[in-house]
Amino acid sequence: MSFPPQHGWTVPPPPPGPQRPIRTRRVFAGIGLVFLGQVVVILLGVVAVVIGSQNANSENAVLGIYLELLLQVALFVACLVVGIVWISRKDRGIGLGILIGWGVSVLVFPVAGIGVCLALVNQGQL
């Protein structure tokens, strides 16, 4: 049986664990921040449709729908940039929550907001 050579070699230490743990509460806080942002964006779009549809020319209400789409794109860019910066430099939980929250909320909130805007324009009750 041979023994290892006597050169002072030892087994290296295990790699360190994650230095910045991802906390569940922080992930849900990030998701909540994005949901709040989606609600604000949708309310701004609906208000723009309501204001635009009060004139005799209903073409102004369509500008509210375009504003809604523009705000959704702006929210996407903001969530992407802020989420990546928070993951890489600050709290990984909030950054991850922002990215997850945008992915979930983009499926639900814009469909509801744009649907409400289109329903208001088509009914012409404003």
Image (cartoon, rainbow, N blue to C red):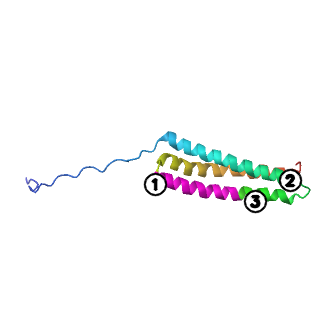
Residue identifier under label 3: 66
Crowding at label 3, few (<14), some or many (≥20) Cα neighbours within 10 Å?
Answer: some
Q: Residue at x 50, y 51 (%)?
A: 86
**Given the image, on which type of amino acid does mark 1 rest?**
Ser
Question: Residue 115, image x and y in percent?
Answer: 76, 51
Decide which of 63, 15 is in the foreground and name it: 63
Residue identifier under label 1: 88
Q: Residue at x 83, y 51 (%)?
A: 51
Crowding at label 1, few (<14), some or many (≥20) Cα neighbours within 10 Å?
Answer: few
- For label 2, the SS is loop
Magenta stretch: includes residue 71 = yes
C-alpha span from label 2 to label 1: 44 Å
- For label 3, the SS is helix
Crowding at label 2, few (<14), some or many (≥20) Cα neighbours within 10 Å?
Answer: many
Q: Residue at x 37, y 47 (%)?
A: 19
Magenta range: 70-89
**Given the image, on which type of amino acid does mark 2 rest?**
Ser
Residue 19 lies left or right of residue 67; in this view the side is left
Residue identifier under label 2: 53
Question: Residue 35, image x and y in percent?
Answer: 63, 45
The reply to whether residue 22 is in sight is yes
